[in-house]
Amino acid sequence: MKSNDSILKTVLLLHSQVQDETFRQISQKGKEMGKGMKMVQKKGHLQYS
């Protein structure tokens, strides 16, 4: 169980790092796309292409 615990923590840590990086990329794309993002947000759905 202990080894599974440490593996899970490592996976979660890697996952959060990936999410941070993805979020940065999406934010950058959002700045570039701007108007398109706002139009999508008005529909109530966030869609990243």
Image (cartoon, grey):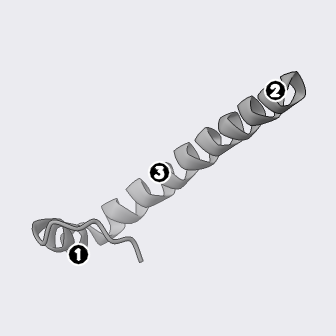
Q: Give the residue at the far front of this rendering.
A: 1
Instruction: Tell us which disc is closer to us: 3 or 2.
Output: 2
Q: For this rendering, which residue is in front, 20 or 44?
A: 44
The secondary element bearing badge 2 is classed as helix
Reply above or below: 5 against 15.
above
Residue 39 falls in which quadrant of the image?
Answer: bottom left
Which quarter of the figure is the N terminus placed in? top right
Q: Are marks 3 and 2 in contact (CB under 8 Å)?
A: no
Rounded to the nearest whole Å, what is the CA distance between mark 2 and mark 1? Answer: 42 Å
Q: Which residue is mark 3?
A: 23
Label 1 is placed on what type of residue? Answer: Gly
Left-right relation of 32 to 13: left
The secondary element bearing badge 1 is classed as helix
The percent coordinates of residue 32 (x first, y second) are 35, 67
Reply above or below: 22 against 33.
above
Q: Earlier in the sequence, mark 3 or mark 1?
A: 3
Reply above or below: 7 against 42.
above
Q: Earlier in the sequence, mark 3 or mark 2?
A: 2
**Disc ID at residue 36:** 1
Label 2 is placed on what type of residue? Answer: Ser
Label 3 is placed on what type of residue? Answer: Phe
Q: Which residue is mark 2?
A: 6
Reply above or below: 37 against 18.
below
Residue 40 falls in which quadrant of the image?
Answer: bottom left
Residue occupying the point 15% across, 66% down: 44
Left-right relation of 37 to 39: right
Left-right relation of 8 to 16: right
Q: For this rendering, which residue is in front, 46 or 1?
A: 1
